[in-house]
Amino acid sequence: MAVRTLTHFIDGAYREGTSGRFADVFNPSTGQVQARVPLASKEELEAAISVAAEAQIAWAASNPQRRIRVLMKFIDLVARDRDALAELISNEHGKTFEDAKGDIQRGIEVVEFALAAPHFLKGEYSSAVGTGIDVYSMRQPLGVVAGITPFNFPAMIPLWKLAPAIASGNSFILKPSERDPSVPLRFGELLQEAGLPAGVFSVVNGDKEAVDTLLDDDRIKAVAFVGSTPIAQYIYERAAANGKRAQCFGGAKNHMIVMPDADLDQVADALIGAGYGSAGERCMAISVAVPVGEETAEALSAKLSERVKHLRVGPAMDPESDYGALVTAEAKARVENYIQIGVDEGATLLADGRGLTVAGHEEGFYVGPTLFDNVTPDMTLYREEIFGPVLIITRADTYEEALALASDHEYGNGVSLYTRDGDTARDFSARVNVGMIGINVPIPVPIAYHTFGGWKKSGFGDLNQHGPDSFRFYTKTKTVTSRWPSGVKEGASFVMPLMD
Ligand code: NAD
């Protein structure tokens, strides 16, 4: 198969990379290299920032209705091309075609939300705060802002970042994951077709060199990151040291607490979907099931063991596949290594996904569904994010013990509770030390008009993604205190005005 050479998208057009450095883009379903993506040099990044800075001035000066009309058109264009975009995602990421359509849809919902920009950019006004004095505030764009995004949602997360940023009047430079950059590049073309002025949105592919340039350049005013925790923390610290605003979302270890009164068939189905969907490569995947009480644990363990036998793992474009391959050979090796660590540390391996081959796709990066029971909190499998199709059962004797497990874990992205008891649900929501909670909902990703963000090592920064927080993140508040000359009658004043 011919290996395509991808580009950047800068100043309204696809641009060839000039650094001479490239990374391979695989088709995980087949294991073959299908493209190579250029890795930008510092100089390429700096040139893109110059273009973005120039374009931002006129973009910020255009009124917000004009800006959101571009996004309205973009929504239609993405809908027109949805299947082709979803196929591109499947072929670079390995997730199934249906799941790839969801990746696009959950991103587009935030673009729809960003159409409310004129409302969110309104300031506040107080008249006559003193004699003849009025105070008002306005929300102004930051300038040029950057997004650095992970491989696991190549459409959704770039859309979460770019839509409110652009609607607010910023220029946006996206540095997508080098594993699956084709859909972000297509977004450049579609935004252009929708009428976005050249330079307002750019895609610059790259690795640490590109990211560090974004972090160090004074013209970048904010950095919006999603990825693994060590990189999130690094980006947060370096951005802050350089005086930038930063929101950096990291890894996860999401628990599902299963109370004895829960409907265990519903729980088992939810766990199978939330644990193995997208091969477990979701930051909101459930990776730890916590049944409360011996009886619940025994019954749940049996139901999950039975269900994993029927999961179908296969190529992304095969409609029979429940989930597909992992993103790279390294990701597969890392997950298989965790399975061995689990065995070595004494957990009970109920289903072993190692050594799976898919007929006709023997080189694909597949790992079968893996299930462990009796995983204790001191084990590596419990403490670390595996990011693969590995579900573990960690048993708790009481509700308080289960609550403490989720609260004390170093990650705090999402957590779910299954129960029929309203008092327990209410107590849990109030007390658990985690950012996003599901009550009888396995993957509690908040809808676009609420905000998304984890706690503890899952999120660094003050303002979340999407919802009203996103407009706060991408704008700064300016406050004007005004008085007309006719109101000044008393000559110089040397004391603080009392406004009484
Ligand atoms: P990653 O941290 O390897 O990469 C994320 C981005 O950072 C990519 O654009 C990558 O090029 C860049 N990057 C990687 N190493 C870098 C370095 N040393 N210096 C500067 N930049 C660097 O993450 P990934 O493997 O692409 O994505 C999976 C991770 O993302 C998981 O940990 C998952 O939980 C997390 N994630 C979190 C959320 C959330 O909202 N909390 C959502 C999705 C994914």
Image (cartoon, rainbow, N blue to C red):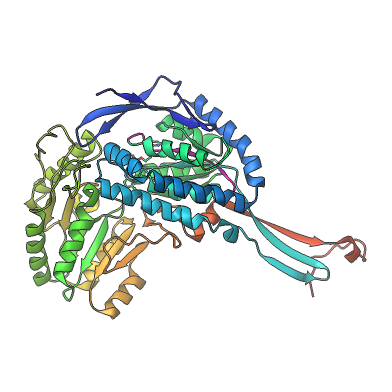
Whether residue 176 appears in magenta in the rendering, the answer is yes
| Quadrant containing the N terminus in the rendered view | top left
Q: Quadrant of ligand 1?
A: top left
Q: Position of residue 372 (x, y in %)?
A: 12, 54
Up-down: is 245 above or below 479? above
Instruction: Please check the rendered image and state whether residue 175 is part of the magenta-colored stretch, yes or no.
Output: yes
Q: Residue at x 61, y 53 (%)?
A: 65
Q: Is residue 404 left or right of residue 139?
A: left
Up the image or down, 124 lies above or below 31; here it is below
Q: Which residues are magenta?
A: 169-179
State the image coordinates of residue 224 (x, y, percent, origin top left): 47, 46
Residue nearest the observer in this picture, 336 or 72? 72
- Placement of 233 over or under 20, stated as above or below: below
Q: Residue at x 15, y 63 (%)?
A: 268
Does any portion of residue 377 appear in the rendered image?
A: no
Residue 431: percent from left, percent from top:
34, 71
* Residue drawn at the location 22% of the way across and 52% of the way down: 277
Quadrant hosting residue 432: bottom left
Q: Residue 155 occupies which quadrant of the picture?
A: top left
| Total number of numbered discs in the rendering | 0
Would you identify the image quadrant in which residue 399 lies? bottom left
Q: Position of residue 27 (x, y in %)?
A: 25, 33
Q: Viewed as shown, does residue 494 lie left or right of 355?
A: right
Closer to us: 118 or 367: 118
Q: Residue at x 27, y 77 (%)?
A: 424
Quick one: quadrant of the C terminus? bottom right
Taking the image as drawn, is residue 8 in sight?
Answer: yes
Seen in the picture, residue 125 relative to 213 is either above or below; the reply is: below
